[in-house]
Image (tube, rainbow, N blue to C red):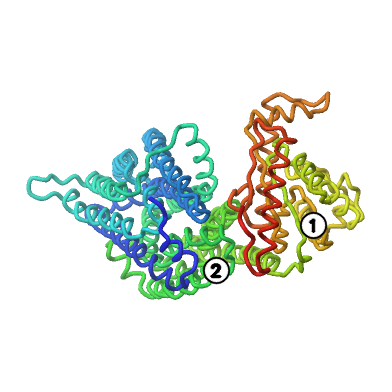
Amino acid sequence: MEKSHSDTYLFGRERIGKVLWKIAPPVMLAQLIQALYNIVDSFFVGRYSPDALTALTVIYPLQLIIIALAVGTGVGVNTYMARKFAMGQERDAEKAAGTGSVLAALSWAVFALLSLAVMRPYVRTSATTPLAVEYAVLYGNIVCAGSLGAFLEGCWTKVLQSRGDMLRPTAAQVAGALVNIALDPLLIFGWGPVPGLGVAGAAIATVVGQGTAAAITGVKGFCPPPRPREMVRYARRIYFYGYSSILMQSLYTVYIVALNVILAGFSDAAVTVLGLYYKLQSFFFIPLLGLQTCIVPVLSFNCARKSYSRCKNIMRDTFLISAAFMAAGIVCFVFFPRQLMSLFSPSPEVLRIGSAAFPIIGTGFLSAVFALTMPVFFQAVGDGKTSVLLAVARQLLCLVPIFWLFSLIGLNYTWLSFPISETVSGGIGLALYRRQTRRWDRLEEAAGAPAAPEAGVRIITVSREFGSGGRELGKRLADALGFDYYDKEIIAAVAKNRGLDQGYVERALDNHGWQKMPITFCHSFVSASPVRFYRTSLLLEQRRVIEDIARLGKDCVIVGRNADMILRAFRPFNLFVCADQEAKIQRCVSRAAPDEDVSEETLVQKMRAIDKGRIKTRELMMGSLWGDRSTYHLTVNTTGWSLKELTPAVAGYAQQFFDRRAEMRPEDPAPAV
């Protein structure tokens, strides 16, 4: 299914408030039903047995792992598909969706086998009474082994959302939750010919509800998987975008297990209080979590199109809406904690502990808006490392150590770790977000600033895969057309301007090998920053050199160095040169030094590493995708051709481009060939 024009307009051009108003309420409704399901589930189980309620709390982290793997994979599919839709590559997006279904099924199989193997040892870390242990093992075995529906629904929901379809996932989640809610009292307590199954009944109701949701989303969300060899490539990209979500959710599980272990040292009632908190806070966090789900495809779409101002507006509205709704959670947790907990447990010990814990935890809800939203933002814009960093800072580096330290003082002090960790991690997230927005401001300023090009100057930019012969073809084009030629000359100019050795600058600007480059004390002192930031300063100097070359007003050919994006205002002819892998290997072998390693494995690794470096540099400096064919006027595959034979044809296309450009007004877009 292709992304419709109306969805493209909605994500890319409609008012932010209208976008969120259209896509967020259905998701929030679904999450409301899910929260009600959790609450109703805990209500009936709590009425069945206090030990059974403890069992649900103990198994809750395992259910979070299911969510982590299912939704994390789905987020990777969602983000990758949104970016492909933004570039008009619908076929790739649908192949990614098919790959996601296979990954979901494989994840379920591995998780089910592992969880069954370690269930009892795991339960004994967080529960002490024998009955609570048996209930937890029984419940955990059923929900883990029967979680295939959860894995598939997590993927298919994200596939549908990437297409702008929020209604079917909402209907699926609502139907699954309602089935679960309806089956809970029937299977737990029994009715008529249906026997009461207790905790096992609650687990079966959960599995059936998940299967119902998967069946509904699978009608439109399932896509045939591509060939196995293709799936490997798509799987890598899916996990590139989704691994941060998986890690964040998994870390969520790790810290809950850690907190359960610490609280078990006080009493099972303390563990139950923590479980009730997580069930209830999910109800009050619905607007925040719903907006997080909705902004991922919208942010990914607009970031891929370099609509950075729109991305900032999305985040501003998300902060304001989330903060307004979180105020309700603060009121309930601070002023009505006993009333909330008495719905699930009549235990005086649980009520006593919770009455002290809930008001303290509630004071951190406003900080949680930023602590929870920032990782999602960086995940949506493709910066998974920062997303994981923020998640680790919040859940492991802050919460667990502080919780443990305060547990040495007393149980009531442990709850202070929640508002403290939310405030610290939220502040770090805002600082990193501000750094990202400043970078966007620089990119927009550079893209929007007039470059004052010389009228009629003809520039050919050559981007190329390593080993494709792009550099030689560029030189031949310059000679054939009588243009100036720039390649290593740009490095020499950068070195001269910065007063540095040319060899050092060349290594620093190398897209592949710069990480291994030693940096001297002198260079560290001059740059006043680590090598990564020093390299960025040299890249900016290189950009200025390229712009100065263009402003000379002389016709020229510039090889590589993102000149096609840097000189957009000059409307150059952008050429991309590629070749099949075998042809690139042969060309590298023919030009290798006598002592150079030219084995096929070495050359393939080198080609991949260099082209990967070009991708990263392009994203760092230009915020766009290197190798995206839609940004070039002509793509040439040199396989089976001699560069001498190709040169006249390419030169002819370039001349045709410049002739057509000369007939157009300055404000018209550059012509396509």
Label 1: how many Cα within 10 Å (few below 14, some 14–19, many 20+): many
- In contact (CB < 8 Å): disc 2 and disc 1: no
Tag on residue 478?
none
**Which of these two is toward me, 101 or 427?**
101
Tag on residue 310?
2
Q: Amino acid at mark 2?
A: Arg
List the residue tagged with mark 1: 546
- Left or right of 382, for residue 517: right
Q: Amino acid at mark 1?
A: Ile
- Left or right of 90, for residue 59: left
- Left or right of 574, for residue 206: left
- Left or right of 284, for residue 244: right
For the point 45% across and 46% down, the residue is 91
Q: Position of residue 466 (x, y in %)?
A: 70, 38
For the point 51% across and 59% down, the residue is 301
**Which of these two is toward me, 616 or 62?**
616
Question: Does residue 179 appear in the picture of this structure?
Answer: yes
Cα distance between the residues tagged 2 and 1? 29 Å
